[in-house]
Amino acid sequence: MICTLTINPAIDRLLFIKEFDRDNTNRIKQSKDVLGGKGTHVSVNLRILGCKSRAYGIGFGKLGKKIESMLKESEVETHFLQYEDGESRMNYALIEENHSCTLITERGREIPEEICQGMLISLEETLRDGDYLVLSGDASNTSVPYIYNLIMESIGKTGKKIRFFLDTSSDNLIRGIGQTPFLVKPNVDELSQVTGKRIQNEEEIMDGIDQIASQGISCVAVSRGEEGSIVRYGNAVYRVFPLTVQVENTIGCGDAFMS
């Protein structure tokens, strides 16, 4: 089973406008609520691809229940911890007619250590040998520093053979690589965070990929937007060219790539 974890899920409210006019009234032509959060995006995209998945997450209040309900409507198996105290976050996407998209995000409720431990126990008890676990998104709102590291380390100690897929940024990415997940998926900006310098060309991308792979990572996939991706799996390197599509907005593109 491919499983996803979204520590900080959200509802994304899409606000369609003609053109964003700063310091003026912008009239909304249409609005729509969709799932937000990287792991939830991965699960829904997997279902579209005909693959079953299980979505783990933490929800708060009515929005938390709505997020889980939307996943179930997409025929995704859910394993959420739900709490009445507080609300899960709401994000706002301003989508213009020229397909430009501006995302305004809430940080999300602070998640205390006891809830983090509850999620860890849930994962340890329900994951099975051979499962994949996608750890994706920002987890800076948890009181447990580097929670992805804790999850990979703790589940590893259970002896279960779980493949971890890591898609995050900043220190969560840099430190998470040290736990040797099966796959790491940075974009170019995140790869720059790992190398400690701004990456400007394909040669520097390859150097960054080699730096990550040298730490025992089996697969490193660097997404590059409209330029496609460069993927190293074992000793083989693939230059992947994207299909030409009409871009509506770019929210969740990296999550679709991960799926």
Image: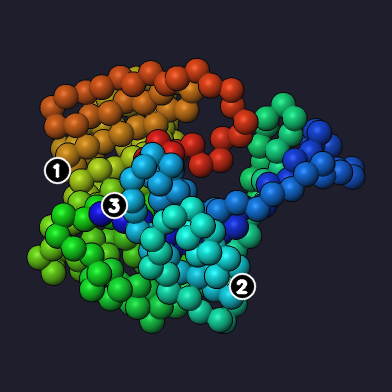
- Secondary structure of residue under mark 1: loop
- In the rendering, at what x and y percent does residue 238 appear? 25, 22
At x 44%, y 78%, the residue is 112
Residue position for label 1: 216
| Residue 253 located left or right of residue 183 | right
- Mark 1, residues whose alpha carbon is within 10 Å: few (<14), some, or many (≥20)? some
- Residue 180: percent from left, percent from top: 19, 50
* The label number, if any, that marks residue 62 in the structure image: 2
Which of the 4 quarters of the picture holds residue 80?
bottom left
Q: CA distance from mark 1 to mark 2?
A: 42 Å
Number of numbered discs: 3
**Comparing marks 1 and 2, which lies closer to the viewer?**
2
Q: Quadrant of residue 232?
A: top left
1 or 2: tag closer to the N-terminus: 2
Question: Relative to 175, is 251 on the left or the right?
Answer: right
Q: Amino acid at mark 3?
A: Ile
Q: Say left or right for 8 vs 124.
A: right
Amino acid under label 1?
Gly
Which residue position is annotated with label 3?
2
Mark 3 to mark 1 CA distance (whole Å): 22 Å
Q: Tell me which label, 3 or 1, sits earlier in the chain.
A: 3
